[in-house]
Image (cartoon, rainbow, N blue to C red):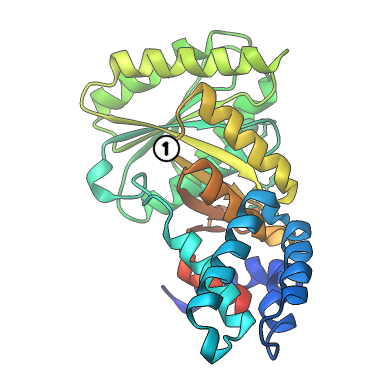
Amino acid sequence: MNKKTHQSLKNAFAKTKNSFFGQIPDIFKSQQLSLNDLEELEDILVSSDIGMYSTTNIIESIKNSFSVQKSTSPNLGILIKNEIQHILESSKHDEISKNENFPQILVMAGVNGVGKTTAIAKLSHFFQQQGKSVLCGAADTYRAAAIEQIKLWGERLNFDVISHQPGSDPSAVAFDTISAAKKRNIDLVIIDTAGRLHENSNLMDELKKIYKVLNQSKGHYNLHTLLTLDATTGQNGLLQAKSFNESIQCNGIFLTKLDGTSKGGIIIPIIEETNIPISFIGTGEQPFDIALFDPNLFTEYVFN
Ligand SMILES: Nc1nc2c(ncn2[C@@H]2O[C@H](COP(=O)(O)OP(=O)(O)OP(=O)(O)O)[C@@H](O)[C@H]2O)c(=O)[nH]1
Ligand SMILES: [Mg+2]
């Protein structure tokens, strides 16, 4: 990783680091473990976007390792950091970014405004840099502006966009996109989808339909669903992940807007409660503001 990427990742996690969440190990740095500390820690973890489930697990693990190492009186700050690192490392490994997954179709899922279309620009930029060819399908036909937005990114970043008229069937766009991709030997096909429909059940049904059509026509392409979540929404993002994953199986998460939030702690319950790997993180509004999620870098930047 080059110096610039390092710096931009550091910046992206700066707000999380400066929040209560990032200060947790410091708060308990010099303290030896007592029951009072654990109660205080529990309150801080719950209020730091980690949520009840992960908090309980972290507290339990700390209690266990305390009873094992009783004679040495462990430093609570180090225990907390290790425990969080342990959860992050338990995550399923991301498949989507792996070279062996190409040629690949990515269906972008997520509610409106989370950053799906911007994520497409970032993914295109990221994989074009690795020499991959990209073709996008403008299957958010719900708004005319959405089609224009993806076309504009295509012009700026030099990828083609397959589109139909506003209001047309999104699955038909998806079908035409994969057909064109096969003819052109494209490495990466990305399908934009609408985040806002009349009702939530419509949104899920539409995604299922798009997925089904692609699954029937994908040929030798690997088909994956990438869920976009907005980190600034905290626990609400976690609820979205659970609800999408119940309707359509999600293979990875693109966690956006980490640069604008202190709620980076949400990464922990996302990994622990959904078992969907975090594939990419968004660190700004530009196409180059993208990084692979690395649990070690996260704990290094936030806790050191
Ligand atoms: N700061 C910051 N802003 C972001 C990031 N990703 C996206 N945005 C901004 O979030 C806003 C919404 O992004 P879109 O990509 O249009 O979101 P979308 O999910 O496609 O929205 P719909 O098409 O309405 O469903 C835009 O203003 C983006 O510039 C990020 O990582 N950081
Ligand atoms: Mg969009």
Please tell me in which quarter of the rendered image ligand 1 is found. Answer: top right
Q: Quadrant of residue 34?
A: bottom right
Residue 299's x, y, as percent? Answer: 55, 72
Q: Is residue 297 left or right of residue 185?
A: right
Q: Position of residue 95 (x, y in %)?
A: 33, 46
User: Is residue 40 visible to us here?
Assistant: yes
With respect to residue 61, does 220 lie above or below? above
Residue at 68% of width from left, 61% of height from top?
259
178 left or right, relative to 209: left
Percent x, y of residue 212: 39, 14
Q: Nearer the viewer, residue 192 or 71?
A: 71
Residue at numbered disc 1: 251
Q: Residue at x 59, y 36 (%)?
A: 241
Q: Amino acid at mark 1?
A: Asn
| Residue 110 position (above or below residue 174) | below
Q: Is residue 72 above or below residue 296?
A: below
Residue 120 shown left or right of residue 112 in the figure: left
* Residue occupying image coordinates x 72% and y 49%: 234
Left/right of residue 210 with respect to residue 199 in the rendered view: left
Q: Position of residue 49 (x, y in %)?
A: 72, 55
Mark 1 lies on a secondary structure that is loop
Is residue 175 visible from the viewing direction of this image?
no
Residue 251 image-quadrant placement? top left
At x 57% / y 85%, what residue is drawn? 74
